[in-house]
Image (spheres, rainbow, N blue to C red):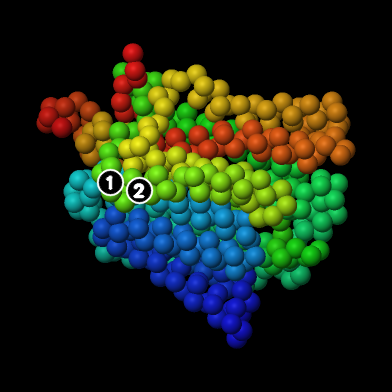
Amino acid sequence: MSVPTLFGLCAAALVGLGLYGVLTNPQPLRKLLAFNVIGNGVFLLFGAIARRGAAAGFAGDPVPHGLLITGIVVAFSATALAVALLLRLFQATGTVTLTDDAPTKAEADDRGV
Amino acid sequence: MTVASALALVLALLLVSIAAWTVVTRRTFAAVEGFVAYGLLLSIAWVALNAIDVALTEAAIGAGLTGVLLIGAAARLRTTEAALSAERPGAPLRGLAAAASAAVAGAIAIGVLSLPDPAPTLAPAVAEHLPSIGLGNAVTAVLLAYRGIDTLLESIVVVFALIGVWSLAPDHLWGGYPGPRQYADPNGILAYLARLLPPIGIIVGLYIFWVGADLPGGKFQGATILAAMWLLAVMAGLADAPPISRTWLRILLVAGPLLFIAIGFAGALTAGAVLAYPDGYAKLMIKVIEAALVPTLTLTLALLVAGAPERTAPR
């Protein structure tokens, strides 16, 4: 099996594992981590496709490489924004649960949180 | 099987195992630590795929900055962990989720195995136009010339993300210092490293930015290393992030994208298209844009990790 195919299959496994984590883990921070694993899988698949596109003296297609760098930086910014939202939710309510019966700010104040 | 493909197989198995562990382990802090190790292995996978520029970005941003961000969040949210694990879905639901995830992974795997041969590629088009740009690094040429619009929008997106993070501040803290004040033992290993590493790291960061024109590297990777050096000094308590109301800070945050937009639109007059460069000046223009983006990106990336304002602004 060629190296790009191997990492392409690895990418498919990463997307599957990340999806399972997003669906089943109740902690928002863990969902975020799992979502990053899905993102890595998508990037790695794109990287494997770029490697297959090696031509004209390049060891890989440079266009996907450029887009991948952009993607990694944007994924980081989105993660940072999500972490900031989580920490703010924690400050406001004392918990980060995503269930419907989560306490509101007023209820949290009543409990002295 | 050659040595290279045997190593790639080991690497792929390690990646999948560590990813599985970060997803299923009960302790969030351990999961995040696993994620950092996984990020570093992933950057080796990028080397195996001959994507050195992506490997540098993955190691610096994917493993490094994301790791610092998640470790900080895991430490602060530790008290919520026990109550939340009670909300874990039951075995039937988890089984259903596993089946759905396996189906998605299987569909992608079928796609991977039936990719067209010969593979479509834009490499010859890049090779044809590369001499007119005057850069040795094709990835930098893609980022700043052929796909300049992506990079322009991206440099704006990171600033927007930072505005989003800042806007989460409660009203009375608006304009204040980001994150909690960090303290560390002034004689400890962290303070020692925070004194020892920045002079080396700053030179490495500037070098990686500068060689990006011709060799693997560039503004994103260089700016991340510079941001990491700053964060190291902040975490060791030797420095503090500036209050977000500082005028110089806000000017630097928008200077890079604004100059990029200005040069981009000047291209409409001098080269006949927005984001085109006049003949013979492409490399100069690209280096000017990259140099202007380095302070913007360094500050933005570091402040994204530092978080929303949590301490009042100075009077």
Please determine whether, in this image, residue B212 is positioned above or below residue B91. Answer: above
Spot the residue most to the bottom: B1
Residue at (57%, 55%) from the top-left corner? B56
Q: In x, y percent, where is residue A16?
A: 45, 63
- Label 1 element class: loop
- Label 2 element class: helix
Spot the residue most to the left: A111
Spatial CA span between label 2 and label 1: 7 Å
Both labels 2 and 1 in a single chain? yes
Q: In x, y percent, where is residue B215?
A: 69, 55
Residue at (36%, 27%) from the top-left corner? B177
Residue at (50%, 35%) from the top-left corner? B300
The residue carrying mark 2 is B192
User: In the rendering, which numbered label is found on residue B126?
Assistant: none
Please give left or right for residue B61 compared with residue B79 in the image: right
Task: Give the amino acid at mark 1.
Answer: Asn
Q: In x, y percent, where is residue B116?
A: 71, 68
Task: Give the amino acid at mark 2.
Answer: Tyr
Quarter of the picture containing the N terminus of chain A is bottom right
The residue carrying mark 1 is B187
